[in-house]
Amino acid sequence: MVPEVFAEGPRGYKQLSTSFVSAGPHPGPGARLLSLDIFRGATIAAMLLVNNPGTWSAIYDPLEHAKWNGWTPTDLIFPFFIFITGVSTAFSFAARVARGDAKNALLRSVLRRSAILFLLGLLLHGFPNYLDLSHLRIPGVLQRIAVAYLLSACAYLYLGRNGRIIATAALLIGYWVLQTMVPVPGGFTGVLEPGMDLGAYIDRIVFTSDHLWSQARTWDPEGLLSTLPAIATAMIGAFVGDWLRSGHDAPTTTMYMLIAGNILIVLGLMWSPLFPINKSLWTSSYVLFTAGFACSVLGTCYWLVDVKGYRRWALPFVVLGMNAITAFFLSSLFSRIIGLIKVEGDVALKTWIYRNVFASWLDPMNASLAFAIIYVMLWTAIMAVFYKRRIFIKV
């Protein structure tokens, strides 16, 4: 199983230019929604920005995750991407059904894509020590995307709209019940502190401490139990994808997306006193809150780009969005490589670049930020070359 490379490019796009096209405000089967690609590209750009500071010891607060409960702009990025996965599922399946693909063919595609994403995540975690996997972290970002995509796509295939609504509610309410009412063996009930919740207990049993997040080893931010509400994030995205394809006029589509987004934000905030907004636990309130933000941002982007036609500003995000997983995987791999290469004795190449190119004339906070910005620009330029040559790697 390997990624597919499309040299001709996806339907609905011309070669790199400022006149790139969109499917318009009423995308039909097989069409792409330009605002969705832009939203995906902006999300990947934000992910690269927060994941690659010059030094982890000097970061502006909005570019860090919340310490535990609460949120920062950085805590919106990962759920945005999973939400986008759900929206894309609705468009992708509609296009394939229009071409005559049966459910079994769609299921095979879902299984293949999920397996590839999961494997890519393990490859990143294992690099470069593939001969010693005794401490390989098994959960991770791509692994969570893979599982959330797999199960949300299966729900989309085999459950009707009402069934998916019930399943989404069951995931969110069920997770809340499990985390707050089920006793942790040898511990307490409903203690939502690092390493003390039910999800952390399950992760230690299933993965053991050797295969969990290296900075904790007692819990994992992408653990098994907290993947359940992440599936709900993708399913909410699929509902939004259905709405975008529903054929309503552009003002109605936009208005209801913004209304729905704000309702979800309010519901998340209302739930948070009982089940705090928490990215590491991916709490149910966090799902509603972040999905509401994602819906509102996509609705705004849809209005600006697909309805009003303001597109030229967004070209860098298009080139990232069209090869999002490729950009994430290669940039993460390259970051590990420059962290392993040693120069001037035992100094990592990344550290040497940060110190000599940025910190030599900027204060630490701005030097660290400048490094991250240049890193995003580098990978945007690389993905622009892919785009110009019409190379789109589809997992």
Image (cartoon, rainbow, N blue to C red):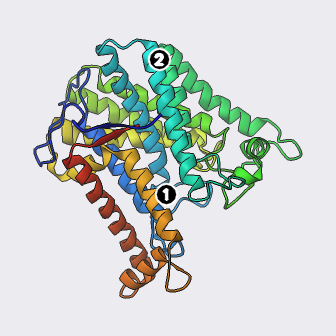
Closer-to-camera residue (132/49) = 132
For image coordinates 47% across by 32% down, the residue present is 113
232 vs 162: above or below: below
Marks counted in the figure total: 2
- CB contact under 8 Å: marks 1 and 2: no
Residue 188 x %, y %: 84, 45
The residue at which mark 1 appears reads as 72
Determine the secondary structure under disc 1.
loop
Tell me the crowding category of disc 2: few under 14, some 14 to 19, or many 20 or more residues within 10 angstroms, Cα based. some
* Gap in angstroms between the C-alphas marked 1 and 2: 34 Å
195 vs 215: above or below: above
On the question of residue 101 being in view, the answer is yes
Looking at the image, tell me whether mark 1 or mark 2 is earlier in sequence order. Answer: 1
For image coordinates 81% across by 42% down, the residue present is 189
For image coordinates 18% across by 35% down, the residue present is 22
Tell me the crowding category of disc 1: few under 14, some 14 to 19, or many 20 or more residues within 10 angstroms, Cα based. some
User: Which residue type does callout 2 highlight?
Assistant: Leu
The residue at which mark 2 appears reads as 157
Give the number of the mark in front: 1 or 2.
Answer: 2
Residue 195 x %, y %: 74, 52
Q: Is residue 11 left or right of residue 340?
A: left
Closer-to-camera residue (131/359) = 131
Furthest toward the right, the residue is 186
243 vs 8: above or below: above
Residue 99 x %, y %: 29, 15
On the question of residue 159 being in view, the answer is no
User: Which residue type does callout 1 highlight?
Assistant: Thr
For image coordinates 23% across by 25% down, the residue present is 27
